[in-house]
Amino acid sequence: MVGSAVVRRLRSEDCDVVTAPRNTVDLRDQRAVGDWLEATRPDGVVLAAAKVGGILANDAYPADFIYDNLVIEANVIHASFRASVRKLLFLGSSCIYPRLAAQPIIEDALLSGELEPTNQWYAVAKIAGIKMCQAYRRQHGCDFVSAMPTNLYGPGDNFDLHTSHVLPAMIRKMHDAKVRGTGTVDLWGTGRPKREFLYVDDCADGLVFLMKHYSADPHINIGTGVDIGIRDLALKIAQIVGYKGEITFDASKPDGTPRKLLDVSRLRRLGWSPKTSLDDGIHRTYRWFAEHAAERTDAARP
């Protein structure tokens, strides 16, 4: 999702874009990654590739989440150094921060407290990626930087109910319920946690901005600076999707982190802020999902 959005954004820039799709390069294969970067010799790298998922996927596949992400970032960062890449931007995740970090979360909160248990495997891997960029910057003088996006959504998202994040999962559930005429949609948790969401094309614009204007050791947050309760998000998505049935919350299932809102003042001082409202972003995402539901998922059809 993020990589595709970055490619879309770069169409308006004076540059040639090369990509490493999964069927071409297995980023977990050190030799394949090294050979690809040696052959292509890009000036810049945006490392958006990762194994991602929601609470269910993180709980079911902790070894996959920590191994795949550690190996991907280690291979790409080290091979970029060896191929003399001039600029590399590593994408982390807001889950790197402590579970009970003060809100909104400043960049300095990293490693100041316990991680959220439901996604600690992914978080540890992403923290390692940040530190790896800093280490290569310190030892080798590499212009490698890190950005920590908040929760992302948009065209190309993962709508599989076993591995998706909360917003696309809600879209999928409510779309299916509307099509099937189901009267109830069940959601995990209490609905009380609050989350921040950034439209993926805004994220891509922010990443291109950072590639041009940011060169420093500390990682930098990228988000909207505004959050919403999960229950309110569900009601908003139901309205946009056109689902009119009941929404229930299963409090026996985990909520995850109580609140996760990023402090984005550092990025705003540099001169960047997002343009897409949450309502507009969900409308665009749902239109994309409805157009691609048959080919991307096993979503019900009338």
Image: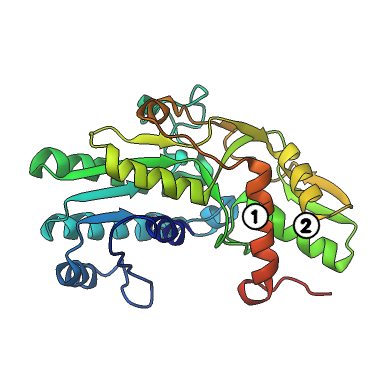
Asked if one can make out residue 235 in the rendered structure from this viewpoint, the answer is yes
- Residue at screen point 45% across, 29% down: 264
Q: CA distance from mark 2 to mark 1?
A: 16 Å
**Label 2 neighbour load within 10 Å: few <14, some 14-19, many 20+:** many
Camera-side residue: 209 or 232? 209
10 Å crowding of disc 1: few (<14), some (14-19), many (20+): some
Amino acid at pointer 2: Met
The quarter of the image holding the C terminus is bottom right
**Which residue is labeled 2 in the image?**
174
Left or right, 85 with respect to 206, comes to: left
Query: In terms of secondary structure, where does tag 1 sit?
Result: helix
Q: Amino acid at mark 1?
A: Arg
Most foreground residue, 133 or 155: 155
Q: Position of residue 301 (x, y in %)?
A: 79, 74
| Residue at image point 25% right, 59% down | 76
Identify the residue at image location x=38%, y=54%: 66
Among numbered discs 2 and 1, the one appearing first in the sequence: 2
Query: Tag 2, which secondary structure?
Result: helix
What x and y, as percent, mark residue 33? 23, 68
- Quarter location, residue 111: top left
Give the side of residue 45 with respect to residue 10, left or right.
left
Q: Residue at x 64, y 56 (%)?
A: 285
Residue 190 can be seen, yes or no: no
Q: Where does label 1 land, which residue? A: 284
Task: Please determine whether, in this image, residue 73 is positioned above or below residue 116.
Answer: below
In the displayed structure, 292 sits above or below 210; it is below
* Of labels 2 and 1, the one closer to you: 1
Residue most extreme to the left: 140
